[in-house]
Amino acid sequence: MEFCKGELVMCIAGREKDRLMCVAEFDGKYVYVCDGKERLLNNPKRKNPKHVIKTDKKLSDSMFLTDRALRKALSKEV
């Protein structure tokens, strides 16, 4: 399964279960996700790709520049 920067995913395991998060990075083995509040852009959470589900939504680059913009974009999607 491939992930790209800016995609929205739903966490299905761990502390973040049932939370919408944004993919910050994908290195082939792990997905790094952030939400702008608990997990900031400069310190994303490393998750196993089996523990997230892709959604059909993706954020534009302008919504992914700051933690504040990311929180605002995620709140509109919920």
Image: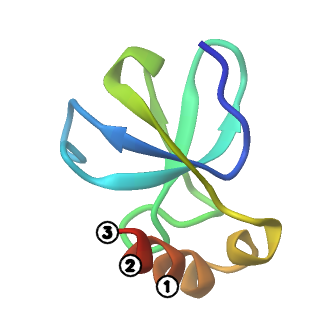
Q: Residues within 10 Å of mark 1 (few under 14, many from 20)?
A: few
Tell me the element at label 3. loop
Q: Quadrant of the N terminus?
A: top right
Q: Is residue 59 left or right of residue 19?
A: right
Q: Residue at x 24, y 47 (%)?
A: 16
Using the numbered discs, state the Cα–Cα distance from disc 3 to disc 1 in whole angstroms.
10 Å
Within 10 Å of the Cα at label 2, are there few (<14), some (14-19), or many (20+) other Cα atoms? few
Q: Nearer the viewer, residue 18 or 48?
A: 18
Give how far across and how far down residue 28 sits, in percent.
69, 14
Q: Which residue is mark 1?
A: 72
Q: Quadrant of residue 75?
A: bottom left
Q: Is residue 69 above or below residue 29?
A: below
Q: Residues within 10 Å of mark 3 (few under 14, many from 20)?
A: few
Per the image, the residue denoted by label 3 is 78
Q: Quadrant of the C terminus?
A: bottom left
Give me the residue at 34% from left, 42% from top.
Answer: 10
**Mark 2 is on which residue type?**
Ser
Q: CA distance from mark 2 to mark 3?
A: 5 Å
